[in-house]
Amino acid sequence: MNKGGTVKVFVPRDTTSRSLGADDVAKAIEGMAASRGNSITLVRNGSRGLYWLEPLIEVEVDGVRYAYGPIASSDVGGLFDANFLSAGDHPFGLGPTEHIPYLAEQDRLTFSRVGIIDPLSLDDYQAHGGYEGLAKAVELECDQIVEIVTESGLRGRGGAAFPTGIKWSTVLSAEGLQKYVTCNADEGDSGTFADRMIMESDPFVLIEGMTIAGIAVGATEGYVYLRTEYPLAIQIMNDAIGIAESAGLLGENVMDSGKTFHLEVREAAGAYICGEETSMLESLEGKRGVIRYRPPLPAIKGLFGAPTIVNNVITLASVPIILARGAKFYQNYGTGRSRGTLTVQLAGNVKRGGLVEIGFGKTLRELLEDFGGGSATGKPIRAVQAGGPLGAYVHPSQFDTPLDYEAFADVGAMIGHGGLVVFDETVDMGEQARFAMEFCAIESCGKCTPCRIGAVRGVEVIDRILGGVDEPGNLVLLRELCDTMVVGSLCALGGMAPFPVLSVMNHFPEDLRARGS
């Protein structure tokens, strides 16, 4: 029993945990505690990201948190019978949470508070190091902040992996009375949920990161472009922004520094193409999400024609710890030109799906086996799509590739937002190739011909191949079409949609053949 006789019990409130019954579990725990005369404080934290164990509940005993999961509401009575409030033994007991191998073997920097704090408790956030980065930033000159971010080696945690410091430096030096910070939270890649986890479980870290970015480049306004399919994240982010404003951490006089930064959530338009930065800016301006020609770059002429930072959630959420602990601290994680940590999301046909944050450099095989535990079916893994629906399918012969941007590029793959979708040996890779082209055809903004027409023709050509119509000739045509889309498309949607198709042609050619009758 903890001091004072009240025990803290943690039940996650993020979207995934709630979809698995966490709200019912929370109610059952409160009801059972009341009926048995137990004094508890129920904290609705975020998920730790061990999604195969959700709902995962925790109890704090003598300063140590013990985990139990997965727990259904029908299991609650048994937990109380087993004296779980004192960390008693139970079949679903997992021991001290921090000792669970899946967590213990991670390097949680950006996600250091996720699953630990009450998402909307500013006191919790600050007790775990929150706002230390901003406190240092307001004492520095703009170029000093940018230099720290540059030296850290932080790169965009999205598709292009562009160096964050260089982007910020461009915005800082650009002329303009008004500048903006925009956060691309339109998380639309298959198998990705890291952005949602941050916004639902640790919203202040994103707010702090965006505020630092604004102060660094002289921007006074920021927007979180948040996908409308994330209603809980929208609610929590709006609540957190209000709390930060009331505490003097946003607004006209940030931390009594005399510096201004306002922040607002804008709901996304529900189109995959709006994940591309210039389409996102068009949508933020109230227009249809269509690709812009470049140059000029958004850093020079972005939102409403003003110099604009465009970063995604994980990039901005990584900034506070860099300012708080220093560039060298962050740079010490990772390898080569891939510095810091990578948030990997394991999804698809995998035994232990969830969020893993590690320093760059571990191999894909280590992620799949040591963390993921292999396929959920127990069958051999045949392919992994890395980097979302535009990412290549990685063949088992490439599983020993280190997770860093350059190493993946060398094998024709990309890390992107860190999503890994796993397929076992039953997958039809020919159908997956067709899906890639069909996805592009549906999601294309229609501005450029290679993407708008090429994806439609790609589906038709693959259908002819699978239907046994001039298979050799159509295979040649398909490769030529892919090459045209790669070099001729205006943006990554058309330019990368061929990557999954080409990876199937190169590594799984036996599946891109005529189907038997």
Image (tube, grey):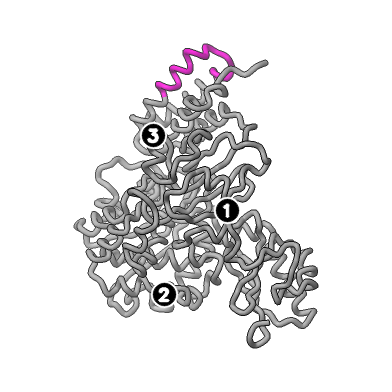
Question: In this picture, which residue range is highlighted in magenta?
Answer: 464-481
User: Alpha-carbon neighbours of circle 1 within 10 Å: few (<14), some, or many (≥20)?
Assistant: many
Q: Label 3, on which residue?
A: 495
Element type where label 2 sits in the image: helix
Mark 1 or mark 3: name the one nearer the start of the chain.
1
Give the residue type that dot 1 points to: Gly
**Distance from the alpha carbon under mark 1 to that under mark 3:** 29 Å
Image quadrant where residue 252 sits: bottom left
Position of residue 436 relative to residue 287, above or below, is: above
Image quadrant where residue 247 sits: bottom left
Position of residue 307 relative to residue 506, above or below, is: below
Mark 2 or mark 3: name the one nearer the start of the chain.
2
Numbered badge on residue 290:
none
Numbered badge on residue 354:
1
* Residue 251 position in % (x across, y down): 36, 73
Q: Main secondary structure of the magenta part?
A: helix
**Distance from the alpha carbon under mark 2 to that under mark 1:** 33 Å
* Residue 131 position in % (x across, y down): 40, 73
Which label sits in the foreground, 1 or 3? Answer: 1
Element type where label 1 sits in the image: strand
Which label sits in the foreground, 2 or 1? Answer: 1
